[in-house]
Image (cartoon, helix red, strand yellow):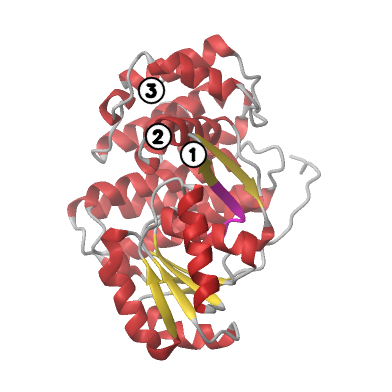
Amino acid sequence: MSTSPFIYNGQPSRVIFGQGSLQQLEAEIDRLGAKRALVLCTPEQRAQAEHIAQLLGSRAADIFDKAVMHVPIETAREARELARKLGADCAVAIGGGSTTGLGKAIAMDSGLPILAIPTTYAGSEMTPVFGLTENGLKRTGKDPRVLPKTVIYDSALTVSLPVDMSITSGMNAIAHAAEGLYAQDGNPVMSLMAEEGIRALAAGMKTIRHNPSDLDARDDCLYGAWLCGTVLGNVGMALHHKLCHTLGGSFNLPHAQTHTIVLPHAIAYNQSAAPGLSRICRALNVEDCSPAAALFDLSSSLGAPTRLKDLGLTEADLDRATDIAMSNPYWNPRPIEAVAIRQLLQNAFDGERPQ
């Protein structure tokens, strides 16, 4: 089998991985040449942010605890202004995609270096992808300035993540890898990482479902999230992410749950045009069904949500969601067709198992 031509650009980020690696935080701040860190978190993770501030001592400029989903532009502006007033020369983002996203919004305008400490499996800490929501529309893009300079992965910080959130966060990460398998700018390195990331996350989530405090399984999930996030950071997004950005930004649906529900249906839409998706079946060790069905079965077996109607979306919203998704669509291996997209959303709304 011949290898098709490709271009590969590695992202310049530093990764510290392992149980107890949080103890290297101060040394990593030194390495950035920073003196005053603004600690970012959601309101729910204030206690973890306070622990980070204690570790930093006098280097902690303050805590900003207003990170929320989809990064409203007003929140981003408030955080940027606080960083400026405090004279912060770096930001430490502890949490999931919402907090990392807020850090990116600060970095985009100020150039402030970001050190990310993920407590979920979102993977956004490994990408130069940013998202901002303004007037009910989520705008996404790529900018090398927003890529965190350093990422500390310590599985002890993920043990408090509830099982249901661990599962949907892990499925969200798998979505990054799955779309990497048919990305317009994909390459063999990213395909290898995608398959291994899906394998590691699936194995870790299966254990966490029954034993949430298993640190080795948490390590597997963080390792998988790192791989899947790296894939997203190196290749383009397609239909799945466009649909999820539409549903999240315009209907305020929860990010990870939306990714979890939509993923099998987006893969079903594309699998006839993307032979590389067979890696999903290999990663999940299944031979008797399609990649889309394998993902749906994995999600169902883990107790994850499978119906958009359960997230508060109404059937009347599906036409508007289709219209938004059809406007300014991302590149996709199969042409985007309104009738087929509307049916995809209906299937996700109802929780139909894809073929």
Q: Nearer the viewer, mark 1 or mark 3?
A: 3
Q: Position of residue 140 (x, y in %)?
A: 59, 43
The circle on residue 348 is: 3
Q: In the displayed structure, would residue 120 be above or below residue 270?
A: below
Q: Residues within 10 Å of mark 2 (few under 14, many from 20)?
A: many
Dot 3 lies on which element?
helix
Q: Closer to the camera, 124 or 138?
A: 138
Local SS, label 2: helix
Q: Is residue 195 visible?
A: yes
Left or right of 8 on screen, residue 278: left
Circles 1 and 2, Cβ within 8 Å, touching? The answer is: yes
Q: Residues within 10 Å of mark 3 (few under 14, many from 20)?
A: many
Quadrant holding the C terminus: top left
Answer with mark 3 or mark 2, whichever residue precedes in sequence.
2
Q: Which mark is residue 295?
A: 2
Give residue 280's mark.
1
In the image, taking residue 181 as reference, residue 8 lies left or right, namely right
Q: Which residues are magenta?
A: 126-131
In space, the residues marked 1 and 3 are separated at their CA atoms by: 20 Å
Residue 307 among magenta residues: no
Q: Residue at x 59, y 64 (%)?
A: 107
Q: Residue 108 location in percent, x, y?
A: 63, 59
- Crowd tier of the residue under label 1, counting other residues whose Cα lies within 10 Å: few below 14, some 14–19, many 20 or above: many
Q: Counting residues from the N terminus, which is met first, the one under dot 1 or under dot 2?
A: 1
Q: 227 or 166, which lies in front?
A: 166
Is the Cβ of the residue at disc 1 closer than 8 Å to that at disc 3?
no
* Residue placed furthest toward the left: 210
Residue at position x 54%, y 76% from top? 90
Q: Helix, strand or loop at disc 1?
A: helix
Amino acid type shown at disc 2? Leu
Where is residue 347, by image quadrant? Answer: top left
